[in-house]
Amino acid sequence: MYLHKTFFMPNTYTQLHVQYVFAVKYRKAVLDTRWDEDLRKYITGIFQNHGHKMLAINNIDDHIHIFGGLNPKQSISDLMRTIKSDSSEWINKRGLTTPKFNWQEGYSAFSYHRNDVDRIFKYVQNQQEHHKLITFPDEHKALLNEFEVIYDERYLFRPLI
């Protein structure tokens, strides 16, 4: 367990655990094992420099999972915008993909009780094995259903062709 410091208001205490999921634009399988660990380290730096606590981060070739403690001084949408834009720039400046790299628009974010932290940590860390059993579109839809998120089928991820 960790203590989450809030920097903007005395007597404000939070314990917010959130899993974020987002994909490469058009679900292109371009996150390469030759450099994806460096990408995860870069994203971890962004996450922590904004006052959040990284618990787990992992990806496969077309999407990424981030699990961490959210500092309420920054909104989830601002955090996601920063991570996605800064990491896209990092990939593009290094010429790691052709053509230009972009993340998809949007993201999913799911909150968890502190009793779920170990389970979700293991789930994120085990993505490579997990995706031998289930596709990303099926995984994402299962998460949306588990959390009773209302969604439009037209905007869900499709299997790769």
Image (cartoon, rainbow, N blue to C red):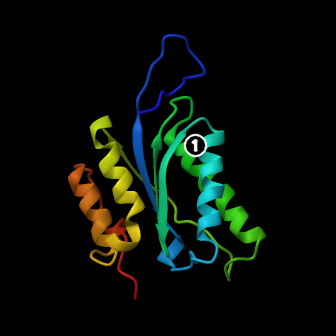
Q: Secondary structure at mark 1?
A: helix
Query: Can you give x and y, in whole percent of width and height, for residue 77 in the image?
Result: 52, 44
Residue 50 left/right relative to 151: right
Nearest the camera: 79 or 12?
Answer: 12
Query: Can you give x and y, in whole percent of width and height, for residue 125 in the image?
Result: 41, 60
Nearest the camera: 62 or 48?
Answer: 48
Query: Can you give x and y, in whole percent of width and height, for residue 33 in the image?
Result: 57, 77
> Which residue shows up at 32% across the image and 78% down it?
132
Mark 1 belongs to which amino acid?
Asp
> Which residue shows up at 34% across the image and 43% down it?
117
Give the vertical position of 1 relative to 38 (above or below): above
> Which residue shows up at 68% across the image and 56% down it?
86
Around disc 1, counting alpha carbons within 10 Å, would you say few (fewer than 14), some (14 to 19), or many (20 or more)? few
Residue 5 left/right relative to 18: right
Q: Quadrant of the N terminus?
A: top left
Residue 154 left/right relative to 49: left
Q: How many marks?
A: 1
Residue found farthest to the bottom: 161
Give the vertical position of 101 relative to 147 (above or below): below
Nearest the camera: 150 or 35?
Answer: 35
Q: Quadrant of the C terminus?
A: bottom left
> Which residue shows up at 36% across the image and 76% down it?
158
Circle 1 is placed at which residue position? Answer: 78
